[in-house]
Amino acid sequence: MSDVMRAAIVHACGEAPRRGERDRPERREGRTVVSVLAAPITPLDLLCASGSSYFGVPALPYVPGVQGVGHLTEDTGWGPAGTRVWFPTSAGMRPGDGSLAQYCSVPEDDLVPLPDGVGETQAAALGLSAVAAWMALTWRAAVRPGEQVLVLGAGGVVGQVAVQAARLLGARRVVAACRADAAREAARAAVADAVVPIEAGDDAATLAGRMAAVCDGGVDVVIDPLFGVPAEAAVRVLAQGGRLVNLGGSAADSATLDSSTLRSRSAAVLGYTNNDLTKDQRRAAFSQVMEHAVEGGLKVAFDMAPLDRVSAAWSSQAAGTAIRRIVVTPWATSTPGNSGLG
């Protein structure tokens, strides 16, 4: 067995990783080695590798990939060798390598067995983004059956899952707000009741008017990975006691929220990060997401790329030209139609 493996390696902050060779990890106390079958390129991966995240500059060079799906290479308390598992990593947040490689060293208590009935690539595409959407709705917003939910950025993975999850949790109406045509189609495929376009140059009042026109009265819960003007607009359509849960700032890092609007409806603006979850919470949330994936209630569109095209896949995801989440398959090599890169 070779002592080296193929891996995506970040050599400099702000640059796409390049395929190279890395020492294959070995089993250590409390950790096991997973043979990686699929690993998504996520916004968190891009942020960490930029060197501008709140985690600080990563130790270079390193293998990115904050999560993945694979099978155990040896027996553990979670199952025998060959058991399929999902796992998170701290790549880019703390020293160490991540999932965009043929093998990955993972703390045993971070592993989550993957149920039968869901494919490795679909599970990888859902992953932590699905956990975030699920927990933002259930834990932070405490959504209740019969409430109306507005999902901003509903064409992304978090948004697609939030639309579907809100329906599964009993929302009476789910409205999606998206920028691009492809994102709006993804939101419709995720069974949104209505889709609101977010246009370039929108101000908060204009966008709020567009939202109000398709919502059935006030909105009880807003899931917001965008912030900026979309969040400013969404606050204006909140119902009495409405809650906006912010998961990111892909539209802007700041927003102007006026006191009178918040006070007049006793509204709440809440922050969310997966990093605040305990391991038990994360495992339970991922397991719930997978149960619904097996039953067909949760799924997202994605493309696949082999490891030897990781630089192109990463650059496409970073530039926003990829219309779907890209999942890297470390053992695959390029074949026509398999890259998802156009």
Image: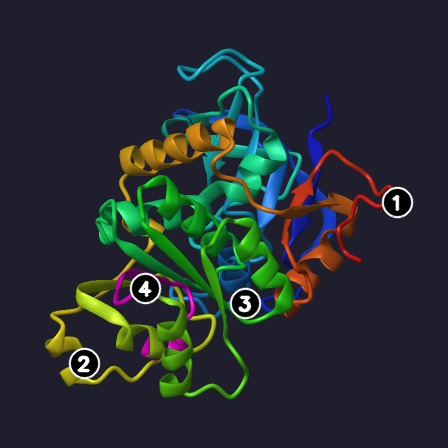
Q: Which residue is mark 1?
A: 336
Q: Nearer the viewer, mark 4 or mark 3?
A: 4
> For mark 2, does the 10 Å Cα neighbourhood hold few (<14), some (14 to 19), or many (20 or more) residues?
some
47 or 301, which lies in front?
301
Nearer-N-terminus badge (4/1): 4
Q: Which amino acid does the dot numbered 3 rest on?
A: Ser
Q: Is residue 260 above or below residue 180?
A: below
Marks 2/4: CA–CA distance: 19 Å
Q: Which residue is mark 4?
A: 216
Q: Nearer the viewer, mark 3 or mark 1?
A: 1
Q: Are marks 3 and 2 in contact (CB under 8 Å)?
A: no
Q: Which amino acid does the dot numbered 2 rest on?
A: Thr
Q: Position of residue 83 (x, y in %)?
A: 54, 17
Q: Which amino acid does the dot numbered 4 rest on?
A: Asp
Nearer-N-terminus badge (1/2): 2
Nearer-N-terminus badge (4/3): 3
115 or 1, which lies in front?
115
Mark sitting on residue 50: 3
The boundaries of the magenta stretch are 217-232
Mark sitting on residue 259: none
Nearer-N-terminus badge (3/2): 3
Q: Which residue is mark 2?
A: 261
Nearer-N-terminus badge (2/4): 4
Q: Are marks 3 and 1 in contact (CB under 8 Å)?
A: no
